[in-house]
Each structure stands twice: as structure tokens, then as C-alpha cells.
């Protein structure tokens, strides 16, 4: 082996499990290091009993709760989950621009008939350029507004894996028909921050099946596929 090309250390083995929650069938996920069993709950929108049952079944140690954005189906159960995990597990994300959504979760719950939704403020707001660690694995943060003002995407380059939230879906994109939605901003974020990645990056999105950057580049009608 050439001395100027040191061996690349293998990526930390990460595993994921999906727990569909709320009537919106949101993909709440567990993400953990299969060596240490330490990890995170991503987007606990509700149905906290089901999330806790999945945590117990997998046997992970939850080090943090991570939010991609402030909509009720992604964040409505965060406060309850933190409390039931003992109150010491920090909530990280989303971007501060979604603070108004997180302050209105209880009202959203009443509107959509989702019992138990509670307002929440993260222990740590995140922004592009900040560092996020899940189970010892680094995730790059991209601020991708449009679906919501504070939507964040989390990218693990070691395993070419993305936590996408509701920014990009298989064959579709996040809704922008909210009063605060911005279609042009969403398309710009996808094209300038996500489509710059190579085709091999796979992603877990907030609803429905996952996909890859390559597939969406070629076939997604909203972004020129």
C-alpha cells in the first residue's frame, strides 16, 4: 500500500428500525451503533408507547432524540418520550426557524385529533455547519427550508446514509402549500445541497419507502428527473 494513501477505517456499523406513528404513518426511526447499542430516536411524532416498546425490543440505549422539523407527526411525542426516558435525554434539532411550530404542537394535536401532543423546546437547536453525533457516527447537517422554515437533513458520509425528514421522497418532495411553505426554496435546497451528493447515497424519509439520490436524480419529476 502506498504510504501517501493510508487505509480507510471501516465505518461504525449502524442499524435502523422504523416505527410508523400517528395517523399520518410517519417514519419514526431508531438509529444505533450495533457494537455499542447506543443511538437515537429520530422524529417521535406520537404513539410513544409503541416507540418505547421498539426501544425495549431492540435493546438500544437512547442517547438523544433528534428532530428533522417541527411538524406534529415528527415532533408531537418528543416531550413525552423525553420524560418517559427519565428526563435526561437531550432533544436536538431542528433549526430555530421552526420554533413557532414546536410552540404550537398541542394546538396542532387538538386540530388533527392526535392525543398527547405537547409543545417542546429542544435542548439544542441545530444549524448547517453544526455537528451531530449518533452512536459515535458523525452526521453533516444541511438546512433545507421550504416544507418548513427549519427543516434539516442529516447526512452520514461514512455509510452514505441520509435522514431526510420531509424534504425529498421517492418520486416526490415535501408539501409547500402551508402559509409558510416555499416551493422555490425547497427545490433550490434539494438541487444545491442534496443532488451534489453521488448517486449511491440512500435515504430514509418521513413517509413511505426510502430511496437513493441516484434514483431521484433520474426519475423524480419535481427535480427534473
Image (tube, rainbow, N blue to C red):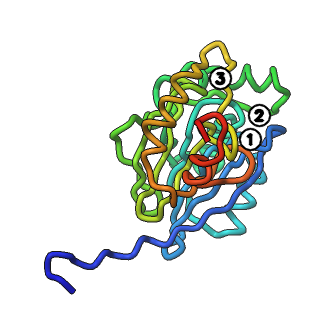
Q: Is residue 53 above or below residue 163?
A: below
Residue depth check, mark 1 versus mark 3: number of the one nearer the observer: 3
Q: Is residue 85 above or below residue 193?
A: below
Q: Residues within 10 Å of mark 1 (few under 14, many from 20)?
A: many
Q: Is residue 207 left or right of residue 6?
A: right
Which residue: 39% across, 57% down? 138
**x and y percentages locating residue 183 in the rendered image:** 59, 22
Determine whether the residue tagged by mark 2 lies in a helix, strand or loop.
loop
Determine whether the residue tagged by mark 3 lies in a helix, strand or loop.
loop
Quarter occupied by the C terminus = top right
Residue 5 quadrant: bottom left
Q: Earlier in the sequence, mark 2 or mark 1?
A: 1
Residue 116, which numbered label?
2
Q: Are marks 2 and 1 in contact (CB under 8 Å)?
A: yes
Q: Is residue 114 left or right of residue 92?
A: right
Q: Earlier in the sequence, mark 1 or mark 3?
A: 1
Residue depth check, mark 2 versus mark 1: number of the one nearer the observer: 1
**x and y percentages locating residue 25 in the rendered image:** 79, 44
Which residue: 69% across, 65% down? 56
Q: Are marks 1 and 3 in contact (CB under 8 Å)?
A: no
Residue 46, which numbered label?
1
Q: CA distance from mark 2 to mark 3?
A: 26 Å
Which residue: 56% across, 57% down? 202
Q: Is residue 93 left or right of residue 205?
A: left
Task: Check the image and name the residue furthest to the top.
Answer: 179
**x and y percentages locating residue 83 in the rendered image:** 62, 44
Amino acid at each position: 500500500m502506498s504510504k501517501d494513501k493510508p487505509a480507510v477505517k471501516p465505518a461504525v456499523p449502524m442499524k435502523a428500525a422504523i416505527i410508523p406513528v400517528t395517523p399520518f404513518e410517519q417514519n419514526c426511526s431508531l438509529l444505533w451503533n450495533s457494537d455499542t447499542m447506543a443511538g437515537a430516536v429520530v422524529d417521535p411524532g406520537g404513539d410513544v408507547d409503541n416507540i418505547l416498546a421498539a426501544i425495549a425490543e431492540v435493546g438500544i440505549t437512547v442517547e438523544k432524540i433528534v428532530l428533522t422539523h417541527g411538524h406534529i407527526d415528527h415532533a408531537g411525542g418528543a416531550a413525552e418520550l423525553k420524560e418517559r426516558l427519565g428526563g435526561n435525554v437531550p432533544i436536538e434539532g431542528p433549526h430555530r426557524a421552526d420554533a413557532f411550530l414546536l410552540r404550537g404542537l398541542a394546538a396542532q394535536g387538538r386540530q388533527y385529533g392526535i392525543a398527547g401532543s405537547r409543545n417542546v423546546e429542544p435542548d439544542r437547536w441545530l444549524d448547517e455547519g453544526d455537528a451531530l453525533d449518533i452512536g459515535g457516527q458523525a452526521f453533516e447537517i444541511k438546512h433545507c427550508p421550504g416544507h418548513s422554515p427549519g427543516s434539516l437533513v442529516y447526512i452520514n458520509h461514512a455509510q452514505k446514509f441520509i435522514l431526510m425528514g420531509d424534504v425529498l421522497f421517492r418520486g416526490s418532495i415535501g408539501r409547500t402549500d402551508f402559509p409558510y411553505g416555499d416551493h422555490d426554496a425547497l427545490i433550490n435546497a434539494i438541487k444545491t445541497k442534496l443532488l451534489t451528493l453521488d448517486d449511491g447515497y440512500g435515504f430514509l424519509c418521513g413517509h413511505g419507502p426510502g430511496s437513493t439520490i441516484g434514483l431521484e436524480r433520474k426519475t423524480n419529476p419535481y427535480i427534473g428527473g
